[in-house]
Image: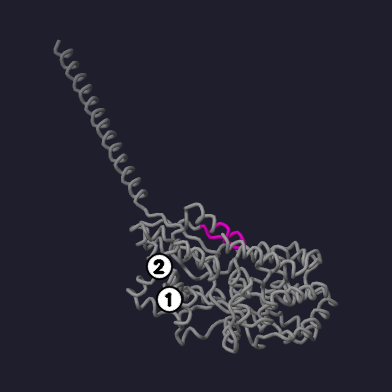
């Protein structure tokens, strides 16, 4: 009996112990689940607390400033862990379409880059862009970083609407090794340009890398600039709405080059990158491009085989032989009015704006691309790469600086009516006069609206 009693006690003890262990295990699991739930809730809360900033510029994909921009955006989110940036940047012709669509749909970016011209002026007139005048007055050290004259590019009716970080120029880029190989003189006038075209064409070298797109139109813009000079380019219309003669004559010069075989055989079908690559890969002797053409994924900033010269002078042209197209590029940064009206978005947008337009950002872009900064450089920074030095020399020796031709005409009209009909014009299907008669009507329609 005693053995049976002892056995019962032993069984009861084991059963109790097992039940106790099970209870403790269940309690642990319950507590662990609770902790996990709390952690998940906290984690979800932390994600929900992040401020989402929408940003867009044309510095993406094959653009030389794409990678430096990504570096800056990454650094910003690392130091502002409560911010998440949606970067909608897009290179090429689609950028402006996306930007304008976002504004039109009521979903504008919070911070964006956009060059001077009709598009930003229209957005300002519609009240879509934040007035930064008070912000800059409250931060004089920030304001004083930039050259005083460049504030004109971002000022409307005495109010400042953007921060001008980038200076741009355009010129005739020449593969001087090809010029030396075929004993060709760098052209200083149109006759010498035609002679260069003749020689390179005879040796199966594409004379001028060109295509019929808005970006390809830089050569046409430089021709117009040389014909009209600063006055006619920056005031393109007569009081009756008709265009200045330099715009019409410029098309006839383009037609002369086309008929002389200056452009690639499939020039009307090329995309922008293919056009650029013709020059970079030494398949073309010349290209009309700008400072943004220099840097990663494009023309190396340390290339010693390329020179930059003013576009050749044209007979009867009003511009000085040294004149170049000069202004501010997509490196002008703005805040949308919608972001400004939201206290949290305004605070974060200002922080991002300061990051993108800082001396640190300027140094990064200048070091890695052909970027021409609007911030004064120190003496140590003036020892720059060869292509940057050549760009500086081009600007320093220019006796006339003319604004980008396409910034003084409505962008839609420029791209759709003017450049959009270049193929037909070059093929003789429509005359320059007929194109600009359409421009006049379109401008009058916009005035009535």
The residue singled out by tag 1 in the image is 359
Q: In the image, which is nearer the foreground, mark 1 or mark 2?
A: 2
Relative depth, front residue between 165 and 181 = 165
Asked if residue 428 is positioned above or below residue 341 in the image, the reply reads below
Residue 385 lies in magenta, yes or no?
no
Q: Can the viewer see residue 300 in this picture?
A: no
From mark 1 to mark 2, how far is it between C-alphas? 22 Å
Measuring from the top left, give residue 79's x and y in whole percent. Answer: 37, 63
Measuring from the top left, give residue 17's x and y in whole percent. Answer: 21, 26
The residue singled out by tag 2 in the image is 131
Quadrant for residue 351, please give it. bottom left
Left or right of 179 on screen, residue 169: left
Which span is picked out in magenta? Answer: 88-99
Measuring from the top left, give residue 166's x and y in whole percent. Answer: 51, 75
| Residue count near mark 1 (Cα–Cα under 10 Å), binned few <14, some 14–19, many ≥20 | many
Residue displayed at 51% across by 76% down = 366
Residue displayed at 19% across by 16% down = 7
Residue 91 lies in magenta, yes or no?
yes
How is the model colour-coded? one colour
Q: Can the viewer see residue 414 in this picture?
A: yes
Relative depth, front residue between 356 and 369 = 356
Q: Which mark is residue 378?
A: none
Asked if residue 356 is positioned above or below residue 145 in the image, the reply reads above
Relative depth, front residue between 120 and 62 = 120
């Amino acid at each position: 009996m005693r053995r049976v009693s002892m056995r019962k006690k032993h069984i009861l003890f084991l059963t109790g112990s097992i039940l106790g262990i099970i209870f403790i295990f269940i309690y642990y699991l319950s507590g662990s689940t609770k902790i996990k739930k709390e952690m998940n809730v906290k984690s979800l809360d932390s994600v929900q607390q992040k401020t989402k900033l929408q940003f867009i510029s044309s510095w993406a994909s094959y653009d030389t400033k794409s990678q430096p921009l990504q570096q800056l955006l990454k650094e910003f989110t690392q130091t502002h862990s409560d911010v998440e940036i949606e970067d909608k940047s897009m290179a090429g012709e689609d950028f402006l379409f996306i930007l304008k669509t976002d504004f039109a749909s009521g979903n504008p970016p919070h911070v964006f880059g956009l060059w001077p011209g009709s598009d930003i002026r229209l957005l300002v007139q519609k009240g879509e862009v934040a007035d930064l005048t008070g912000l800059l007055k409250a931060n004089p050290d920030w304001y004083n970083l930039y050259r005083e004259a460049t504030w004109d590019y971002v000022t409307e009716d005495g109010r400042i609407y953007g921060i001008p970080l980038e200076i741009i120029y355009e010129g005739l880029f020449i593969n001087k090794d090809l010029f030396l190989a075929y004993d060709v003189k760098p052209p200083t006038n149109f006759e010498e340009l035609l002679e260069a075209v003749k020689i390179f064409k005879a040796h199966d070298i594409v004379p001028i890398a060109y295509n019929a797109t808005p970006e390809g139109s830089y050569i046409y813009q430089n021709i117009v600039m040389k014909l009209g000079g600063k006055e006619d380019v920056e005031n393109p219309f007569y009081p009756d709405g008709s265009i200045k003669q330099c715009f019409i004559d410029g098309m006839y010069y383009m037609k002369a080059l086309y008929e002389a075989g200056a452009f690639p055989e499939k020039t009307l079908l090329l995309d922008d990158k293919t056009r650029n690559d013709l020059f970079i890969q030494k398949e073309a002797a010349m290209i009309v491009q700008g400072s943004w053409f220099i840097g990663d994924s494009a023309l190396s900033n340390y290339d010693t085989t390329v020179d930059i010269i003013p576009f050749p002078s044209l007979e009867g042209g009003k511009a000085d032989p040294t004149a170049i197209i000069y202004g501010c590029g997509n490196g002008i940064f703005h805040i949308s009015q919608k972001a400004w009206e939201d206290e949290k978005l305004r605070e974060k947008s200002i922080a991002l704006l300061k990051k993108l337009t800082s001396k640190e950002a300027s140094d990064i872009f200048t070091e890695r691309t052909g970027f021409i900064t609007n911030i004064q450089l120190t003496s140590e920074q003036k020892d720059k790469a060869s292509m940057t030095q050549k760009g500086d020399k081009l600007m320093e020796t220019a006796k006339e600086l003319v604004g980008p031709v396409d910034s003084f005409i409505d962008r839609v009209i420029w791209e759709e009516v003017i450049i959009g009909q270049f193929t037909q014009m070059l093929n003789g299907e429509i005359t320059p006069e007929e194109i600009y008669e359409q421009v006049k009507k379109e401008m009058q329609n916009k005035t009535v609206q």
